[in-house]
Image: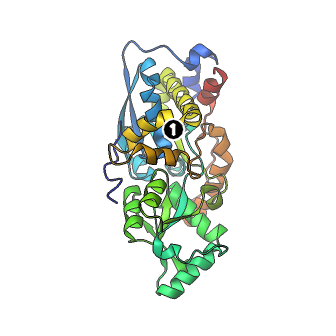
Amino acid sequence: MFTRRRILEAGSLAGAAALVPSAGRAQARPQARTTPLTLKVGLIPILAAAPITVAEKEGWLKEAGLATAVTTFESGPNAIQALASGTLDVYVAGVAPLIVARSRGLDIKVVASTAVEENVFVAAPKLARFAEAGIPPAEVFKRFRAATGAPARLATQPLGSVPNTTLQYWLFEVAKADPKDVAIVSMGIDATQQAILAGAVDGGTLREPAVSIVTGRNPEIRLLALGGEMFPSQPGTVVALTKAFLDREPEAAQALVTAIVRAIDLIGRDPARVAPAIEGALGKGLIDTATIRRALASPATRFAADPRAIVEATAAMQRYQVKIGALDKEAPLDGLFDPRLYERAVAAR
């Protein structure tokens, strides 16, 4: 459904709600449309986007008369540009860029989560050698700089993204690293993976399946911090819909969220069943199914569909984005999350 060719080379929902029937089994799995509707989906090709793949592979979207036209992006901020231009209906990426976009007038609703605490920190071999058991991260970076004469170069996505915010929070609020000991380098997801594998950077934030890929290819690359350590209850990938789409296609919106909830449940219950479909979407022959199965079992993988569970952590992330200059000021989040489609899907199961 979507490719990852370079993966180894490196407003209000009120109007819409009025059109959506009350909770019930029939409403959670609406009948197929007489005329198929193509959803214009923008996503980052990571494991957290797998529920879309699974929902399509299982035939649940087709049953509801839906198809997908997918565009992939290297980061959430890049996807926001397409969302703002009206070329996307559905956004599947980090929540942090949506905060920025909403502060600039983009009317969009987070209707589901797909994963939490997915951004982790890995150290390339040169840095990993200093990460002895019991040594605090700040001391690891200090020793690296003392030995090499240069700060550790750490790769992550652009300012305003969840990976960037998470990395800065971990470095300076949790680990209390000296800013002189680290240098943050902004680059895309594939470039980050390639740079860590090549030793062009000393570490960085990765998500699955990249974590399983790089540690599988080079065992000297080490996972040093999990997502919850880096940012407590770290909000991750979400599904967001434009107000225009919600107003125009409320039943399709419900069908999409219902399919995602079903997919996340299936991934948790039967990872062996979904692994080949995810491998086909993410890898296109460049990743084997065994790697996908390791990624599904990874401590860096936590699928979760309830958007209500990340509201508080998203507010905390927004506060920190103001502190680091990704946002000018905090904005109310009341209009960003709308869990009603999720609640209907769960109530009807």
Q: Is residue 35 above or below residue 152?
A: above
Provide residue 81's location: percent of width, then percent of height.
39, 48
> Is any part of residue 178 visible from this angle?
no
Q: In which quarter of the view is residue 307 placed?
A: top right
Q: Is residue 278 above or below residue 136?
A: above
Q: In this view of the protein, which residue sits in the foreground, 230 or 287?
A: 287
Provide residue 300's location: percent of width, then percent of height.
57, 52
The quarter of the image holding the N terminus is top left
Residue beneath the point at 62% across and 53% down: 234
The colour style of the image is rainbow
Provide residue 89's location: percent of width, then percent of height.
42, 34
Q: In which quarter of the view is residue 226 placed?
A: bottom right
Q: Which residue is mark 1?
A: 240
Q: How many marks?
A: 1
Q: In which quarter of the view is residue 195 placed?
A: bottom left
The residue under label 1 is which amino acid type? Answer: Ala
Residue beneath the point at 53% across and 87% down: 146
Q: Within 10 angstroms of label 1, few (less than 14), some, or many (20 or more) residues?
A: many
